[in-house]
Amino acid sequence: MRILVVGGSGLIGARVVDVLRGRGHAVTSVARTVLPGVDHLLDLEAAAIDDLRPLLAGHDGVVLATRADEQRVLRRPIHPVLHRELVEPAVRLFTAARREGLTRAVVMGSYYTHFDRAHPRWRLAARHCYIRCRREQAREARAAAGPELPVAVLELPFVFGRAGDRLPNWAGPLDRWARSRAPLVVPVGGTATVSAHSVADLTADALERGDGGDLPVADENLSWAEMMTRIAGAVGRPRRVGRLPATAVRASLRCGGVLHTLAGREAGINPAHLADLLLAELFLTPTTGRSLDPALRDTFTAPVPPPGGSRC
Protein backbone atom coordinates (compact mmCIF):
# COMPACT_ATOMS: atom_id res chain seq x y z
CA MET A 1 0.00 0.00 0.00
CA ARG A 2 0.89 3.67 -0.33
CA ILE A 3 0.13 5.62 2.84
CA LEU A 4 0.26 9.37 3.52
CA VAL A 5 1.13 10.21 7.16
CA VAL A 6 0.11 13.71 8.23
CA GLY A 7 2.14 14.73 11.27
CA GLY A 8 4.92 12.39 10.24
CA SER A 9 7.60 14.26 12.21
CA GLY A 10 5.94 13.83 15.60
CA LEU A 11 6.46 11.17 18.24
CA ILE A 12 3.66 8.94 16.96
CA GLY A 13 3.79 9.92 13.31
CA ALA A 14 7.51 9.19 12.99
CA ARG A 15 6.99 5.74 14.55
CA VAL A 16 4.09 5.05 12.20
CA VAL A 17 6.27 5.92 9.21
CA ASP A 18 9.02 3.55 10.39
CA VAL A 19 6.66 0.65 11.11
CA LEU A 20 4.81 0.97 7.80
CA ARG A 21 8.06 1.06 5.84
CA GLY A 22 9.30 -1.91 7.85
CA ARG A 23 6.24 -3.84 6.68
CA GLY A 24 7.01 -3.03 3.06
CA HIS A 25 4.53 -0.19 2.51
CA ALA A 26 5.41 3.00 0.63
CA VAL A 27 5.00 6.04 2.87
CA THR A 28 4.82 9.78 2.23
CA SER A 29 5.48 11.85 5.35
CA VAL A 30 4.13 15.39 5.65
CA ALA A 31 4.57 17.88 8.50
CA ARG A 32 4.57 21.60 9.14
CA THR A 33 8.30 21.81 9.93
CA VAL A 34 11.41 20.87 7.98
CA LEU A 35 12.95 17.80 9.60
CA PRO A 36 14.85 14.76 8.32
CA GLY A 37 12.44 12.23 6.85
CA VAL A 38 9.69 14.74 6.03
CA ASP A 39 8.77 14.55 2.34
CA HIS A 40 6.41 17.54 2.09
CA LEU A 41 5.70 20.62 4.20
CA LEU A 42 2.04 21.09 5.10
CA ASP A 43 0.18 23.28 7.57
CA LEU A 44 -3.00 21.25 7.83
CA GLU A 45 -4.90 24.02 9.61
CA ALA A 46 -4.34 26.34 6.65
CA ALA A 47 -4.63 23.79 3.82
CA ALA A 48 -7.75 23.77 1.65
CA ILE A 49 -9.25 20.62 0.13
CA ASP A 50 -7.74 21.48 -3.25
CA ASP A 51 -4.31 21.81 -1.61
CA LEU A 52 -4.62 18.35 -0.11
CA ARG A 53 -5.82 16.41 -3.13
CA PRO A 54 -2.49 16.44 -5.03
CA LEU A 55 -0.70 15.11 -1.93
CA LEU A 56 -3.27 12.33 -1.51
CA ALA A 57 -3.44 11.34 -5.16
CA GLY A 58 -2.18 7.82 -5.81
CA HIS A 59 -2.29 6.77 -2.14
CA ASP A 60 -4.36 3.95 -0.66
CA GLY A 61 -4.62 5.30 2.87
CA VAL A 62 -3.97 8.26 5.14
CA VAL A 63 -3.04 8.67 8.81
CA LEU A 64 -3.83 11.82 10.78
CA ALA A 65 -1.23 11.95 13.57
CA THR A 66 -1.20 15.62 14.54
CA ARG A 67 -1.66 16.45 18.21
CA ALA A 68 -3.32 19.11 20.37
CA ASP A 69 -2.60 20.22 23.92
CA GLU A 70 -5.71 19.59 25.99
CA GLN A 71 -4.23 21.36 29.04
CA ARG A 72 -3.63 24.66 27.28
CA VAL A 73 -5.46 27.59 28.89
CA LEU A 74 -6.93 30.28 26.62
CA ARG A 75 -9.44 33.08 26.86
CA ARG A 76 -13.06 31.94 26.72
CA PRO A 77 -14.51 30.40 24.67
CA ILE A 78 -11.94 27.71 23.87
CA HIS A 79 -14.25 25.56 21.73
CA PRO A 80 -13.74 27.55 18.47
CA VAL A 81 -9.95 27.20 18.84
CA LEU A 82 -10.02 23.45 19.48
CA HIS A 83 -12.61 22.92 16.75
CA ARG A 84 -10.40 24.81 14.31
CA GLU A 85 -7.36 22.71 15.30
CA LEU A 86 -8.94 19.26 15.64
CA VAL A 87 -12.15 19.04 13.68
CA GLU A 88 -11.98 21.31 10.65
CA PRO A 89 -8.61 20.00 9.35
CA ALA A 90 -9.85 16.40 9.70
CA VAL A 91 -12.99 17.21 7.71
CA ARG A 92 -10.99 18.78 4.89
CA LEU A 93 -8.41 15.98 4.87
CA PHE A 94 -10.97 13.16 4.67
CA THR A 95 -13.12 15.01 2.16
CA ALA A 96 -10.04 15.26 -0.08
CA ALA A 97 -9.14 11.62 0.62
CA ARG A 98 -12.62 10.43 -0.36
CA ARG A 99 -12.50 12.44 -3.58
CA GLU A 100 -9.12 10.90 -4.42
CA GLY A 101 -10.49 7.38 -3.91
CA LEU A 102 -8.54 6.36 -0.79
CA THR A 103 -9.88 3.25 0.91
CA ARG A 104 -8.51 3.32 4.48
CA ALA A 105 -7.66 5.87 7.16
CA VAL A 106 -6.61 6.22 10.80
CA VAL A 107 -7.02 9.16 13.20
CA MET A 108 -5.06 9.45 16.44
CA GLY A 109 -7.76 10.25 18.97
CA SER A 110 -8.10 10.18 22.76
CA TYR A 111 -9.14 7.50 25.22
CA TYR A 112 -11.45 10.06 26.80
CA THR A 113 -13.94 9.40 24.00
CA HIS A 114 -13.96 5.72 25.00
CA PHE A 115 -14.86 6.65 28.57
CA ASP A 116 -17.43 9.16 27.31
CA ARG A 117 -19.21 6.28 25.55
CA ALA A 118 -18.72 3.80 28.38
CA HIS A 119 -19.83 6.16 31.17
CA PRO A 120 -22.45 8.61 29.86
CA ARG A 121 -23.28 9.68 33.41
CA TRP A 122 -19.81 11.21 33.70
CA ARG A 123 -20.91 13.83 31.10
CA LEU A 124 -17.33 14.15 29.89
CA ALA A 125 -18.10 15.86 26.57
CA ALA A 126 -20.37 18.36 28.29
CA ARG A 127 -17.80 19.19 30.97
CA HIS A 128 -14.57 19.17 28.96
CA CYS A 129 -14.28 21.01 25.66
CA TYR A 130 -11.31 18.93 24.53
CA ILE A 131 -13.32 15.70 24.88
CA ARG A 132 -16.27 17.30 23.10
CA CYS A 133 -14.02 18.27 20.18
CA ARG A 134 -12.44 14.81 20.04
CA ARG A 135 -15.93 13.33 19.78
CA GLU A 136 -16.82 15.86 17.08
CA GLN A 137 -13.58 15.08 15.25
CA ALA A 138 -14.40 11.38 14.97
CA ARG A 139 -18.01 11.96 13.96
CA GLU A 140 -17.38 14.70 11.41
CA ALA A 141 -14.28 13.03 9.93
CA ARG A 142 -16.29 9.88 9.27
CA ALA A 143 -19.15 11.89 7.78
CA ALA A 144 -16.69 13.61 5.42
CA ALA A 145 -15.06 10.29 4.48
CA GLY A 146 -18.35 8.56 3.69
CA PRO A 147 -18.96 4.80 3.68
CA GLU A 148 -16.36 4.11 1.00
CA LEU A 149 -13.49 5.35 3.21
CA PRO A 150 -13.48 3.60 6.63
CA VAL A 151 -11.85 5.74 9.33
CA ALA A 152 -10.41 3.95 12.38
CA VAL A 153 -10.01 6.09 15.50
CA LEU A 154 -7.20 4.94 17.79
CA GLU A 155 -8.23 6.10 21.26
CA LEU A 156 -4.90 6.81 22.92
CA PRO A 157 -4.04 7.07 26.64
CA PHE A 158 -0.66 8.33 27.94
CA VAL A 159 1.83 7.55 25.15
CA PHE A 160 5.45 6.89 26.16
CA GLY A 161 8.47 6.93 23.89
CA ARG A 162 10.89 9.10 21.97
CA ALA A 163 11.46 9.83 18.29
CA GLY A 164 14.70 11.79 17.96
CA ASP A 165 14.19 14.79 20.24
CA ARG A 166 10.38 14.46 20.11
CA LEU A 167 8.79 13.48 23.41
CA PRO A 168 5.27 13.49 24.87
CA ASN A 169 4.26 17.05 25.76
CA TRP A 170 3.69 16.07 29.43
CA ALA A 171 7.06 14.32 29.82
CA GLY A 172 9.10 17.43 30.67
CA PRO A 173 7.21 18.42 33.84
CA LEU A 174 7.13 14.83 35.14
CA ASP A 175 10.83 14.40 34.37
CA ARG A 176 11.76 17.56 36.30
CA TRP A 177 9.53 16.58 39.22
CA ALA A 178 11.00 13.07 39.42
CA ARG A 179 14.57 14.46 39.37
CA SER A 180 13.85 17.13 42.00
CA ARG A 181 14.01 16.82 45.77
CA ALA A 182 10.29 17.55 46.04
CA PRO A 183 8.16 14.76 47.52
CA LEU A 184 6.29 12.60 45.04
CA VAL A 185 2.63 12.56 46.06
CA VAL A 186 -0.15 11.55 43.69
CA PRO A 187 -3.90 10.88 43.81
CA VAL A 188 -5.51 7.48 43.95
CA GLY A 189 -6.68 6.29 40.56
CA GLY A 190 -4.64 5.62 37.48
CA THR A 191 -4.47 5.44 33.73
CA ALA A 192 -3.91 3.20 30.76
CA THR A 193 -0.52 3.63 29.11
CA VAL A 194 0.94 2.64 25.75
CA SER A 195 4.23 2.96 23.86
CA ALA A 196 4.51 4.91 20.63
CA HIS A 197 5.77 1.74 18.96
CA SER A 198 2.63 -0.18 19.96
CA VAL A 199 0.50 2.66 18.60
CA ALA A 200 2.39 2.45 15.32
CA ASP A 201 1.95 -1.33 15.11
CA LEU A 202 -1.79 -1.05 15.78
CA THR A 203 -2.07 1.75 13.21
CA ALA A 204 -0.49 -0.46 10.57
CA ASP A 205 -2.81 -3.34 11.56
CA ALA A 206 -5.88 -1.10 11.19
CA LEU A 207 -4.74 0.14 7.78
CA GLU A 208 -4.03 -3.37 6.52
CA ARG A 209 -7.48 -4.54 7.66
CA GLY A 210 -9.27 -1.44 6.38
CA ASP A 211 -10.77 -1.07 9.87
CA GLY A 212 -13.27 1.69 10.56
CA GLY A 213 -13.93 1.19 14.27
CA ASP A 214 -13.15 2.89 17.56
CA LEU A 215 -9.99 1.21 18.85
CA PRO A 216 -8.92 1.89 22.47
CA VAL A 217 -5.27 0.87 22.86
CA ALA A 218 -3.10 0.15 25.91
CA ASP A 219 -0.01 -1.83 26.87
CA GLU A 220 -0.38 -1.57 30.66
CA ASN A 221 -2.82 -0.14 33.19
CA LEU A 222 -0.99 1.70 35.99
CA SER A 223 -2.02 3.49 39.14
CA TRP A 224 -0.59 7.02 39.37
CA ALA A 225 1.65 5.76 42.19
CA GLU A 226 2.96 2.90 40.03
CA MET A 227 3.59 5.25 37.12
CA MET A 228 5.51 7.82 39.19
CA THR A 229 7.49 5.07 40.95
CA ARG A 230 8.66 3.74 37.59
CA ILE A 231 9.44 7.22 36.27
CA ALA A 232 11.52 8.01 39.37
CA GLY A 233 13.42 4.77 38.88
CA ALA A 234 13.99 5.52 35.19
CA VAL A 235 15.59 8.92 35.93
CA GLY A 236 17.82 7.43 38.60
CA ARG A 237 15.98 8.88 41.62
CA PRO A 238 14.01 5.90 43.00
CA ARG A 239 11.97 6.73 46.08
CA ARG A 240 8.64 6.24 47.79
CA VAL A 241 5.53 7.78 46.22
CA GLY A 242 2.87 9.02 48.64
CA ARG A 243 -0.88 9.45 48.19
CA LEU A 244 -2.81 12.72 48.15
CA PRO A 245 -6.18 12.69 49.95
CA ALA A 246 -9.07 12.86 47.49
CA THR A 247 -10.52 15.85 49.36
CA ALA A 248 -7.30 17.82 48.83
CA VAL A 249 -7.26 16.98 45.12
CA ARG A 250 -10.87 18.08 44.67
CA ALA A 251 -10.44 21.30 46.64
CA SER A 252 -7.29 22.32 44.80
CA LEU A 253 -8.74 21.72 41.35
CA ARG A 254 -12.04 23.42 42.19
CA CYS A 255 -10.01 26.44 43.22
CA GLY A 256 -8.19 26.33 39.88
CA GLY A 257 -11.54 26.24 38.08
CA VAL A 258 -12.76 29.30 39.99
CA LEU A 259 -9.57 31.21 39.16
CA HIS A 260 -9.98 30.38 35.46
CA THR A 261 -13.58 31.61 35.55
CA LEU A 262 -12.65 34.86 37.29
CA ALA A 263 -9.91 35.48 34.71
CA GLY A 264 -12.22 34.70 31.79
CA ARG A 265 -10.04 31.77 30.77
CA GLU A 266 -10.72 28.14 29.91
CA ALA A 267 -8.77 24.89 29.55
CA GLY A 268 -9.54 21.98 27.24
CA ILE A 269 -9.87 19.77 30.33
CA ASN A 270 -11.92 21.74 32.85
CA PRO A 271 -10.07 21.84 36.20
CA ALA A 272 -13.38 22.06 38.07
CA HIS A 273 -14.12 18.49 36.94
CA LEU A 274 -10.57 17.19 36.50
CA ALA A 275 -10.55 15.53 39.93
CA ASP A 276 -13.19 13.07 38.74
CA LEU A 277 -10.78 11.91 36.04
CA LEU A 278 -7.65 11.86 38.21
CA LEU A 279 -9.33 9.86 40.97
CA ALA A 280 -10.82 7.29 38.60
CA GLU A 281 -9.12 4.20 37.24
CA LEU A 282 -9.03 5.08 33.54
CA PHE A 283 -8.05 1.56 32.56
CA LEU A 284 -8.56 -0.15 29.21
CA THR A 285 -9.08 -3.83 28.48
CA PRO A 286 -7.78 -5.82 26.83
CA THR A 287 -4.18 -4.64 26.85
CA THR A 288 -1.49 -5.75 24.41
CA GLY A 289 0.44 -7.42 27.23
CA ARG A 290 3.64 -5.69 26.14
CA SER A 291 5.89 -4.20 28.82
CA LEU A 292 6.00 -0.43 28.92
CA ASP A 293 9.56 -0.46 30.31
CA PRO A 294 11.50 0.09 27.05
CA ALA A 295 9.36 3.10 26.12
CA LEU A 296 9.53 4.42 29.66
CA ARG A 297 13.34 4.27 29.57
CA ASP A 298 13.30 6.08 26.20
CA THR A 299 11.12 8.84 27.64
CA PHE A 300 12.95 9.28 30.95
CA THR A 301 16.66 8.66 30.70
CA ALA A 302 18.82 8.49 33.82
CA PRO A 303 21.89 10.80 33.77
CA VAL A 304 25.20 9.16 32.97
CA PRO A 305 27.65 9.37 35.90
CA PRO A 306 31.00 11.06 35.22
CA PRO A 307 33.89 8.68 34.50
CA GLY A 308 35.43 7.41 37.73
CA GLY A 309 32.92 9.35 39.80
CA SER A 310 29.56 8.86 41.41
CA ARG A 311 26.25 10.62 41.06
CA CYS A 312 25.18 12.93 43.83
Image (cartoon, helix red, strand yellow):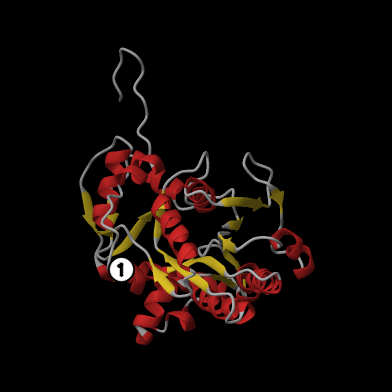
Residue 87 position, x and y percent, is 62, 73
Residue 277 position, x and y percent, is 35, 71
Residue 288 position, x and y percent, is 29, 59
In this rendering, is residue 134 above or below 9?
Answer: below
Q: Residue at x 39, y 75 (%)?
A: 114
Amino acid type at circle 1 is Leu
Extreme top residue here? 308
- Whether residue 46 is visible to the viewer of this picture, yes or no, is no
Q: Residue at x 58, y 75 (%)?
A: 149
In-image side of 172 versus 296 (left or right): right
- Whether residue 146 is visible to the viewer of this picture, yes or no, is yes
The residue pinned by badge 1 equals 284
Residue 161 position, x and y percent, is 42, 46
Q: Quadrant of the N terminus?
A: bottom right
Q: Nearer the viewer, residue 163 or 247?
A: 163
- The 10 Å Cα crowd at callout 1, few under 14, some 14 to 19, many 20 or more, is some
Number of numbered discs on residues: 1
In-image side of 50 versus 69 (left or right): right
In this rendering, is residue 308 above or below 142?
Answer: above
Q: Residue at x 33, y 37 (%)?
A: 235
Residue 176 lies in quadrant: top left
Q: Nearer the viewer, residue 229 or 136?
A: 136
Extreme right residue here? 50
